[in-house]
Amino acid sequence: MTTPRKRAERPEGPRRPGGPRRPEGPKRPGLFPCFLTVDAVPPLVIGNAVILEAKIRLLLKFAPCVDLVTDLRPVSRLGADRRVRVLEDVPCGGSHDHIAGRPLVILDTADPALNAALSAVARAAGVPVNVPDNTTLSSAWLGSIVDRAPVLIAISTGGASPVLGQRLRARIESMLPAGFGRLATYLDRRRDDLQGLVPARRRAIQHRIVDGPAADHIISGDDAAADRQLASLILVNGGAKADSICGQMKIVDIGNGDVGLLSLRGVETIRNADLVVHETGTDAAIIDLARREADFATLPDDLPGAAVREPVGTIADMVVDALIKEQLVVLLLPHASPAMAMLVGRLAADGRTAAVIPAASPPDNIPPDNSSLDDIGTGRSGTGTMIRAAG
């Protein structure tokens, strides 16, 4: 009998040119991106390290005041800005009682033991703490920031490569003009004008404002020209020529379930959906394309034909209800899907219409963009540009 050969052990870590492999570093914690308010309670900076000067400058771009505890006397450049409030009688070693309730603490006392103790106090109090160049003691990271107020974009590598974050920031800054934040301000001011429209139509109009010529007017400060375009869009969306993505059903061909094979149009359709219908086992990367506010319905793919009828009927009712509310319903169509075919047939019998969006490279057995609901249910290919149910 032949003994199977064991696969060679993988060496640890990447190899440095001309040297031994470098051991893998500690596993980095999971990070959740969020933004903190720093205008009500001042953030606290503790320490004596020169690097804190840059951290204070960064904080003062967003916070009206920063509290500082330092052993440096005179305070030197750390407290040179008049918006920095130095706690004169508090040494770094006695700053424990000043941590609770802060929105953020940044510290580097140049004493590793004291840094660890102060970090532990902050964590116990539920206060985000950053210790520069020390991921072990940090529970918060200061990412690279693209500031197009009120639009803020923060980029973090979890402390793994600040230089990479800085390069990404530079690329994004080159893409966004200095007045880009005016778009957010304008849409916020016009919120009441859109309030009477159903959510899907509101989103459609805002997409057209952001992606169309109105954006150039807003960024350049010509709100009057943007207002004329907005009024025109509201009239079109409020009348018989209602926006094409509202109150309709679209079928996105996801092929074998690989998110990389989705067409750009398919990706955009999923992102705009109000209700997403998918089968059990659909790749999470595809489902995650949808908005967090969207509703989801899951078709079981492991039930026999008779047993699947009840969940299909329930989901069909959900689809009809969403269409009545003028929402966008998206069905994610995989290969060889009896349950999805049954749902499509049920909707076709009810007289519902939809458009099929093919994958980037659709296989021959997947209906193209001109198929009908009946065709998808039976495997035939149609001829219209809009899929139409028999009724």
Image (cartoon, helix red, strand yellow):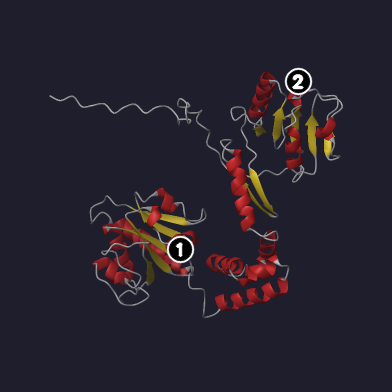
Q: Residues within 10 Å of mark 2 (few under 14, many from 20)?
A: some
Kindly identify the amino acid type of the residue bearing the numbered disc 1. Thr
Q: Is residue 156 visible?
A: no
Mark 2, secondary structure of its residue? helix
Between discs 2 and 1, the one toward the N terminus: 2
Q: Residues within 10 Å of mark 1 (few under 14, many from 20)?
A: many
Quadrant of image for the N terminus: top left
Which residue is at the front of the view, 282 or 255? Answer: 255
Total marks placed: 2
Rendered location of residue 205, percent (x, y): 58, 69
* Above or below for 237 versus 172: below
Identify the image quadrant of residue 150: bottom right
Mark 1, secondary structure of its residue? helix
Which residue is at the front of the view, 274 or 50? Answer: 50
In the displayed structure image, the side of residue 329 where residue 154 appears, left or right: right
Q: Is residue 190 visible?
A: yes
Identify the image quadrant of residue 134: top right
Q: Which mark is residue 269?
A: 1
Rendered location of residue 214, percent (x, y): 64, 71
In the displayed structure image, the side of residue 117 where residue 347 appears, left or right: left
Residue found at x 56% / y 65% = 203
Rendered location of residue 355, percent (x, y): 38, 70
Kindly identify the amino acid type of the residue bearing the numbered disc 2. Gly
Circle 2 residue: 93
Q: Residue furthest front?
A: 18
Q: Residue furthest bottom?
A: 240
Q: Alpha-carbon distance for marks 2 and 1?
A: 56 Å
Residue found at x 53% / y 66% = 200
Q: Residue furthest top?
A: 113
Residue found at x 65% / y 39% = 142
Rendered location of residue 66, percent (x, y): 78, 37
